[in-house]
Image: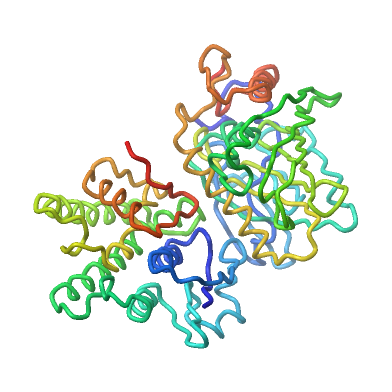
Amino acid sequence: MKLYDFVLSANCYKVRLLLGFLGVSYDSEVIDFHPGKEHKGEAFRLINPLGHIPVLDDDGYVLRDAHAILVYLASRYDPGRSWYPVTDPERLGSVAQWMAFADATASTASATRLHVNLGYDFDVDERRAAAHELFRVADEHLWFGERTGNDWFVPGPLPTLADVAVFPDVVLAEEGGIDLMDYPSLVRWTGRVKQIPGFSVMPGVFPFERA
Amino acid sequence: MPIATRETTDPVLDGWHPIAASGELSMGEQRRTRLLGEALDIEIDLLGNASVARATAPAEPLPTHDRYGYLWTCLGEPSIPLFEIPEVDEPGRRVLHAGTIGVHVSAPRAVENFLDMAHFPYVHTDILGVEPFTEVAEYDVHIDSINELWATDCVFWQPIAATTSTEGQMTDYEYRVPHPYCVILYKTSPIDDRKDVIALFCQPVDEERIEAHMFLCLLDASNSTAMIRDFQLTIFGQDKPILENQYPKRLPLDPRAETPIRADKVAISYRRWLSDQGVTYAVIPA
Ligand SMILES: [Fe+2]
């Protein structure tokens, strides 16, 4: 299995995280996203005409888009069906809802990080404000979950793709100048994700440390 | 406050500073950047020549230099020559820009972190260091005849010293600080008698922010540019949160102001060296 990958990409990190949780081994095909912009080049457009990473190549089956890759990997390599709970319509609906939420954090929290780190041209104040609004909603959701003994975005005993999808943009948000101090439930949840067996870090993300 | 509006003899004002990786500028491009608290406009004409001007009305042209793969400019009197890196002309070396990363830290804090070996096992675990090999052995510090600061005879055990590594090695390090905000590292190559050259050129955006430009001059003919950049970006990405969590963001030069655990010999020398030159920008003067 091959992942077209860039070490500092939050979207690639999502896929690496799930591969770790599932215990699936893979090879990284490193794309020179920065500064080379290889993902916008002619050769890479043959792999993904949209010019985005990540892209997964599983024995010739080629799939683009981080969330699509998460769905595929969980459906193929999680025999317990817990990460993508297809047998439970309501939980499955909620997973899809929070994955859509993660699309919104990508265009806000992740965009501010790209602005600060790599100089991408965004209206950073506007994106930051929008990210805070999203984080406030997520924090409140998790706070109510904690009150009823739920650790994860989608209530249930085990984490789902919702947690995988949301985690990178939250844990890396401070790199984009978004302080997590006002979101204690969200911060506690990142600690729980870090304790899932198979968890992996990336530059900017630290392993779990008991306080 | 922009440095140029200050009453100052700070050598930072008259020094050259990097403002872009030349290879990332394309013909006809116009780009705005910031240096020492001021907005600058970079323009590349259709012949590929770069011009830089203060983004004022009317625009005030500034001197430029294109060296080591970066565009450099000076906001004061360009009386201090840009330092030399003779290795770039040696045969068999690969000169490469590894990337530019914005960091919410002062330039001297970033330089000081670059000079620090003690953090390798904890921050760059299994790459530039690993427990229990945490001890920084005794090394030498001196200032040479052209007032560049050196730390020599540094050694450290490294699991993966470079992209060319196939096994762990005892790496020899020499650090050179030829400019208040630029630092160069010479380290044992796993495959050559000469040393790999790795440099951090900080563009001081203001007193608490930099654009970190990563320069490489390596003995590595085999790995792809993507792989070499991946290695450096991984290391720097690990340093970034450490840098951004240092307070105060400006570097205190008073030896009594801060007793950082990591302020070892070279850090103390670097702070004194900045102080002796009269650097006031992005530091808290003694
Ligand atoms: Fe470091």
Instruction: Please say which color scheme the image uses.
Output: rainbow
Q: Position of residue A32 (x, y in %)?
A: 60, 66
Left or right of A85, for residue B232:
right
Looking at the image, which residue is at 52% across and 36% down?
B206
Looking at the image, which residue is at 58% across and 72% down?
A29
Residue placed most toward the observer, B48 or A167: A167
Q: Position of residue A35 (x, y in %)?
A: 60, 61
Quadrant in which the C terminus of chain A appears: top left
Left or right of B254, for residue B104:
left
Ligand 1 quadrant assignment? top right
The residue lying furthest to the right in this view is: B91
Q: Position of residue B68 (x, y in %)?
A: 76, 50
Looking at the image, which residue is at 83% across and 25% down?
B144
Residue placed most toward the observer, B240 or B283: B240
The residue lying furthest to the bottom in this view is: A60
Q: Quadrant of residue B110?
A: top right
Looking at the image, which residue is at 54% across and 25% down?
B251
Q: Position of residue A161 (x, y in %)?
A: 29, 68
Q: Is residue B266 above or below residue B197?
A: above
Q: Is residue A148 visible?
A: yes
